Amino acid sequence: MKELKKEDISQEVFDLYDDYAHNKLDRKEFLKKLSLYAVGAITLPALLSFISPNYLDSVTIQPNDPRLKSEIISYESPKGGKKMKGLLFIEKDTKVKLPGILVVHENRGLNPYIEDVARRAALESYITLAPDALSPLGGYPGNDDDGRAMQKKRDQNEMLEDFIAGYQYLKNHKDCNGKVGVVGFCFGGWISNMMAVKLPDLNAAVPYYGRQPSDEEAVHIKSPLLLQYAGLDKRVNAGWPAFEKVLKANNIAHEAHFYPDVNHGFHNNTTPRYDKAAADLSWNRTIAFFEKHLKT
């Protein structure tokens, strides 16, 4: 069987996967359309396997990394009616209080990729918290397809309130110095934008390819923003001109970066949408942004 490479896959396949990942197609329709691209030596199972997340081989910081102390924490869900759970990470033997980073997952719950991102951030000398919005439904089920189906059952504004409660938990944690930022991906990018709208004391927000708030919401933003966009992401990028207009008109501190020729999800190193150069550059910018706003 031919070993697939990124260059073997047409852009239409990535666009198709994006529609499926964002619930615009059900699985039956997705597979039917995907089969049109399974030609010659490229079989449908091989194509499906290639574009699906590979969590096992993509971890950059092992869950048992000896440099980190990890803990499953819980806090009240103000809207969900049950406990929220999350993973808390901090470097071992830390003697001083650290600034905090809330890490917000995509539209499928707290999967291994987001856990890994939280560990990466913790090793930059932050206390990090990655909540699971699926907690009231039993938590991330172990695969993204079921995770997406579960997250569709929750109201997005209720989940926003759950993440805001996570922010408050982190801000008041005994090991946090009270300065807290948020980074989120896809759905988590929207959450990051909306936390900036809702929380005047948020110190920094880094939305990755996140849907923008409305003009009426955006005028309330006080925290500085670092906005990360994928050049090929027409769906999300369509909302940028209006958002930029509001940010500029209201003198809201922000910087935006568009990474050319990369897809939505380019930071996620578990799928072929990943682009190492763009992911590394965007992450370096993210850490520098948090250094500026959380450590000075």
Image (cartoon, grey):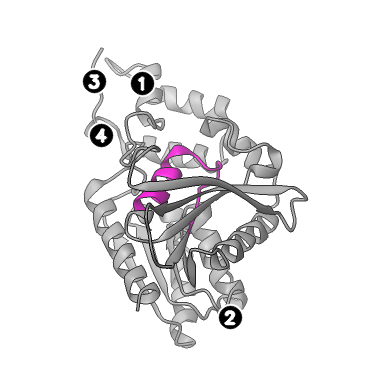
Q: Which mark is residue 6?
A: 4
Q: Which mark is residue 3?
A: 3
Q: Nearer the viewer, residue 50 or 179?
A: 179
Q: Residue at x 24, y 46 (%)?
A: 276
Pick the quarter of the image with the N terminus.
top left
Magenta residues, as a range?
102-120
Considering depth in this image, is 44 or 211 the residue closer to the camera?
A: 211
Mark 3 vs 1: CB contact within 8 A? no
Q: Which amino acid does label 1 sit on?
A: Ala
Q: Nearer the viewer, residue 117 or 3?
A: 117
Mark 4, Cα crowd under 10 Å, few <14 / some 14-19 / many 20+, is few
Q: What is the C-alpha distance between the residues marked 4 and 3?
A: 10 Å
The residue tagged 2 is 220
Gap between marks 3 and 1, in whole Å? 13 Å
- Tag in front: 2 or 3: 2
Identify the mark nearer the N-term, 2 or 4: 4
- Say what secondary structure mark 4 lies in: helix
Name the amino acid type tagged 4: Lys
Question: How far apart are the two marked residues, 4 and 1, measured between alpha carbons?
Answer: 14 Å
Write the residue at 70% across / 43% down: 136
Magenta-drawn stretch contains 103:
yes
Left or right of 169? Residue 130 is: left
Residue 40 placement (x, y as % from top left): 28, 15
Q: Which of 68 and 163 is in front in this view?
A: 68
Q: Is residue 241 depicted above or below 157 in this figure?
A: below
Q: What residue type is labelled 3?
A: Glu
Q: Work out whether residue 84 can be spotted.
A: yes
- Residue annotated with mark 1: 38
Label 2: few (<14), some (14–19) or many (≥20) C-alpha neighbours in 10 Å: some
Number of other residues with Cα within 10 Å of mark 1, as a class: few under 14, some 14 to 19, many 20 or more: some
Alpha carbon distance from label 2 to label 3: 50 Å
